[in-house]
Amino acid sequence: MPTTHSFFSSQTVCVTGAGGFIASCLVKLLLKRGYTVKGTVRNLEDPKNSYLKALQGADQQLILCKADLLDFDSLRNAINGCDGVFHTASPLTDDPVEAVEPAVKGTKYVIKAAAEAGVRRVVFTCTIGAVYMDPNRSPDMVVDESCWSDLEFCKSTKNWYCYGKTVAERAGWEDAKERGVDLVVVNPALVLGPFLQPTVNASIVHILKYLTGSAKSYANSIQGYVHVKDVAMAHVLVFENPSASGRYLCTESVLHRGDVVQILSKLFPEYPIPTKCSDEVNPRKKAYKFSNQRLKDLGLQFTPVKQCLHDTVKCLQEKGHLPLPRVRSML
């Protein structure tokens, strides 16, 4: 924990896309640490945002603001008067138009608004998808903050989310330098753990499908994983630590999908978890090496992936998205 906690707790920060998976967990943490939070949502009347108002401290410290990534004035109004900005809002879609324009333009607008408001630091939530997608990388190479995804490869594989986020991050760095904004970037892997929203988000669906029987097999692919609470804390640490700069890779493990289903079947054997790989012809994909040392150096202690998966399933059960097993599972 940073020693500067008490100093920052009197500050006001903006969290864009406050209703998102990472953002809502971040809002909860910021409120707990005493910050006043201006959270942007697209529709103030939407009942799905009511859970934000129910967070501890929200009645006094949380201000919800209507804003849209493609509306500069709405972002500027939300960011005015803030000491810092956490830009977490981003469209999660495979549509090339919807994935790219709001991600890039929204980031540029946030940087511009932050410059005009004179904020101390902007923390941008990017993705590991802007880091590791490079078909020419040597398998022996350690993936770290110096790595960038290959844009042509993202395009050719139609991974528009990773393409949009990579372009948005590059634009963010360029604009931040030009406007004199102190920018720090967090690049999380696939985020797991308990979610505050009433609905299941895209990254949790990835796990849910293995428990409901809808997935009869698992893919021959690898994925980085990290706990949502670790991602939220990473954002706070890079904001509060004056020496923080550049990019921070935020992942605890890189696992093959076969390893994921194996852990799930040991923790929750009552569910119809697939045991067969959908690709039994090609060799099993190997996990790449990575370094999360930069966040560890700031004091972040990563939650083991086994705990991430356990917490995810427990949350799905508690929120009624997954039927409770008859036999109690053991961690």
Image (tube, grey):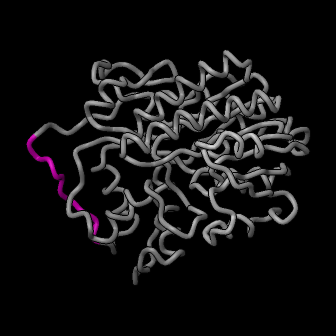
Residue depicted at 54% across the width and 36% down the height: 126
**Magenta span covers which residues?**
272-281
Q: Is 24 rendered above or below residue 152?
A: below
Q: Is residue 129 left or right of residue 182?
A: left
In the foreground, 45 or 17: 45
Image quadrant for the N terminus?
top right
Q: Position of residue 31 (x, y in %)?
A: 79, 54
Q: Is 94 rendered above or below residue 48?
A: above
Which residue reaches farthest left? Answer: 281
In the foreground, 59 or 271: 59
Which residue reaches farthest bottom? Answer: 326
- The image quadrant that residue 243 belongs to is top right
In the foreground, 235 or 3: 235
Q: Does residue 287 belong to the magenta stretch?
A: no
- The image quadrant that residue 245 belongs to is top right
Q: Position of residue 92 (x, y in %)?
A: 45, 48
Q: Is 42 rendered above or below residue 168?
A: below
- The image quadrant that residue 289 belongs to is top left
Q: Does residue 273 belong to the magenta stretch?
A: yes
Q: Is 247 rendered above or below residue 82?
A: above
Give the tally of numbered discs. 0
Residue depicted at 64% across the width and 34% down the height: 109
Q: Is residue 226 left or right of residue 184?
A: left
Q: Is residue 74 left or right of residue 188?
A: right
Majority SS type along the magenta span: loop
Residue depicted at 75% across the width and 58% down the height: 64
Q: Position of residue 182 (x, y in %)?
A: 73, 23
Q: Position of residue 256 (x, y in %)?
A: 31, 44
